[in-house]
Image (spheres, grey):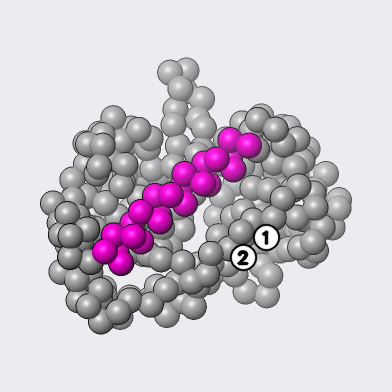
Amino acid sequence: MILGNARPNGQLTPCELCPLRKRSGLRAFSAEELEFVKTFKADELRVEPGISFLREGSRNDHLYTVLRGWAFRYKVLDDGRRQILNYALPADMVGLQGTLMREMQHSVEALTPVVLCVFPRAKLWDLYSRLPSLAFDVTWLAAREEQLIDEHLVSLGRRTALERTAYLLLHLFVRAEEAGMVKDASIQFPFTQQHVADTLGMSLVHTNKTLKRLFLTNAVRWKDRVFEVLDRAALVKIAGSSVNQYLPRPFI
């Protein structure tokens, strides 16, 4: 199964050997759930950075779980301005909107090399009818996506530039923690200041100046894409809100 510029990964990762299952922040499958997911999964795709593997307005017969890598959801205005809506990390699901509504309302681009587990829409009803526990997980993932968009809207509408910048970096740091990607309070963020600007609805110059103000607080350090939280309490205070963690969180 080929999707745009995506290509088969070459070798299918057995579900029982899935690297995500080793992460303590993700809930364990029962034996029955694991057997179903093995039959539900149809393929794996690899997408190179910069490729939009789901496009707004396209129809889609599959949904996907990010096995490895980072991606982001976005919309583009008629004049070319881009708004990044959210980011997808390992264990996150993408494409559910296009699967259920028959048409994507946003696009998704690979930020790093991404590997996707592919699940056909045709089998989604089997999941809901046979395994309500997994059906709840899909519902939870959709509800959480709504909650993340709510917070993003609050940032754009009510938080100051410094607050929204601090909140975004804290939000992504916490999500990376949930995915088991943080070590010694640091992580290599794959995005640039332009991505931050497009997420926060700010110019690149304004974003650069705001980041410099944030770095002067000594709450965080971001050098050569390695992001470190030096004072978590201070970062939460600047952001004006903490970010809830959901552990162990579901995935498909």
Depth check: 226 or 14 in front?
A: 14
- Amino acid identity at mark 1: Phe
Q: Magenta span: helix, strand or loop, mainly?
A: helix
Against 41, residue 209 (above or below) is: above
Q: Residue at x 17, y 60 (%)?
A: 129
Queried whether the magenta region covers residue 85, the answer comes back as: no
* Residue 61 visible, this orientation: yes
- Amino acid identity at mark 2: Ile
**Quadrant of res 181:** bottom right
Depth check: 116 or 4 in front?
A: 116
Against 192, residue 106 (above or below) is: above
Left/right placement of residue 72 relative to residue 62 reads: right
Give the magenta range.
132-154
Against 37, residue 201 (above or below) is: above
Q: Position of residue 112 (x, y in %)?
A: 45, 55
* Residue 208 visible, this orientation: no
Q: Position of residue 45 (x, y in %)?
A: 26, 58
**Quadrant of res 116:** bottom left
Instruction: Find numbered disc 1 in the image and state the secondary structure of the residue it sits on.
Output: strand
Left/right placement of residue 92 relative to residue 245 reads: left
Q: Residue at x 22, y 36 (%)?
A: 102
- Sequence-wise, the earlier of marks 2 and 1 is 2
**Quadrant of res 154:** top right
Instruction: Find numbered disc 2 in the image and state the secondary structure of the residue it sits on.
Output: strand
Q: Which mark is residue 187?
A: 2
Residue topped by disc 1: 227
